[in-house]
Amino acid sequence: MFNPDTITRFNNTETPFYYYDMGVLNQTLQACHNASAKYGFHVHYALKANFNPKVLDMVRSFGFGADCVSGNEVKAAVEHGFSKTQVVFAGVGKSDKEINLALDTDIFCFNVESVQELYIINELAKAKNKTAKVAIRINPNVDAHTHHFITTGLDENKFGVNTWQLSEVIEALRACPNIQFLGVHFHIGSQITDMEVYKSLCIRINEIQTWFEDHGFTVKVLNAGGGLGVDYHNPDTNTISDFESYFKVFKDFLNVRADQEVHFELGRALVAQCASLVSRVLYVKNGQKKNFLVLDAGMTELIRPMLYQAYHEIENLTQKSQPQTRDLKYDVVGPICESTDCFRKDVDLPESFRGDLIAVRTAGAYGEVMASGYNLRDRVQSVYSD
Ligand code: LLP
């Protein structure tokens, strides 16, 4: 990701910034495209992971659809050339304004998260003399074995409807003439690397689709959501997620009917490895028990370590190429007035100095998009390999 020319270029660039390696993005998208196209699976890119315009343009060029969770994401997807017939719209709290926008856009499908939402979409569609196509988001109660902050598929979650509410769902579907039932939708969590979890999901999807069929519904769409994880520990040696194994699990374990479509909503696995947050050491504080590297980037630029105790590799790009004298342990912290503003404690790094460039790796997903203006910080900039 970083060759000497890149580092020279960084030396002349104001920090902090997100550095996008467009080659890595391209290779990742190609790998996902190849692995999914083999089975005719439809992949929608989850814009929430990263809606940087250059990223969106490249994702779209591979023919992926868009998975949106706000009216503005629906708008951005269409503006960036994603086909409206490939836009799905999820979200536990879609406002009337957002539903109306999606209806006006004639999107492919609403992923509906409650019975009440179904009635509201029906009402708003009726007012426009339209029919809204929907998939019902169901909690399959599958444990994703991921961090509890980003698991979503267990019972009693704010997302989706639970299986014991399905009778109510079909009652509502029968009572809503401006709703067209397309199928079922699931999303059990994020950063999932254990393929057994997806196998369990397939088994639950099979049971649930049979239940709908037994009640007289044709299930045209099976949407398995997203969640495929990436290797945060080895960004250079294991850059591309195992798309082959991932899609093969669904090929092997999902009971796909004739004329049925299988959809996915991947975010992280497509974009995480293509970007790093690059910052400079502002100050080095050598304490009695601890050394601190104070960076010019913090939780306002990348909040994942602080919010989810997420692990990101940290590298000193300046010292990397120098003959080393010694390694030290540092707490790598940001400038924000919060003690939680720490990227990681006890990081082994070459002895570091004011002005050194530090890269926080695997920051392409849920990085730039979750940046905030807290402390009235400047908006973080982006730099691209091309
Ligand atoms: N579909 C739905 C309905 C979702 O809620 C999500 C992510 C995705 C697809 C895409 O999931 P992915 O393939 O990226 O795992 N900010 C957290 C992650 C939150 C995920 C939210 N939902 C993080 O930085 O780890």
Image (cartoon, rainbow, N blue to C red):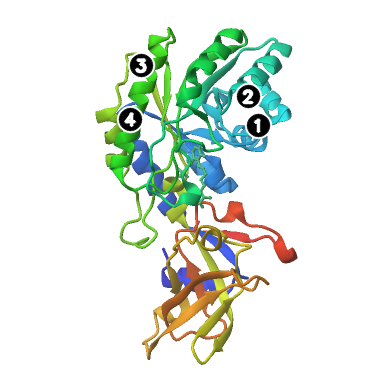
Mark before the other along the chain sequence, 1 or 2: 1
What amino acid is found at the position of numbered circle 1 in the picture? Lys
Instruction: Read off the residue under disc 4.
Output: 202
What amino acid is found at the position of numbered circle 3 in the picture? Thr
Separation of disc 4 and disc 3 at Cα?
Answer: 12 Å
Mark before the other along the chain sequence, 2 or 3: 2
Badge 3: how crowded within 10 Å, few (<14), some, or many (20+)?
A: some
Tell me the residue at 29%/42% (across/down): 195
Q: Which mark is residue 94?
A: 1
Q: Secondary structure at mark 1?
A: loop
Mark before the other along the chain sequence, 1 or 3: 1
Tell me the residue at 51%/62% (across/down): 305
Badge 2: how crowded within 10 Å, few (<14), some, or many (20+)?
A: some
Tell me the residue at 56%/28% (across/down): 113
Residue 69 percent location from the top left of the image: 59, 36
Position above or below: 51 against 81 = below
Q: Which mark is residue 210?
A: 3
Instruction: Read off the residue under disc 2.
Output: 117
Res 377 visible: no
Separation of disc 1 and disc 2 at Cα?
Answer: 8 Å
The answer to which image quadrant residue 95 occupies is top right
Q: Secondary structure at mark 2?
A: helix
What amino acid is found at the position of numbered circle 2 in the picture? Glu
Mark before the other along the chain sequence, 4 or 3: 4
Q: Nearer the viewer, residue 163 or 260?
A: 163
What amino acid is found at the position of numbered circle 4 in the picture? Cys
Q: Nearer the viewer, residue 223 or 215?
A: 215
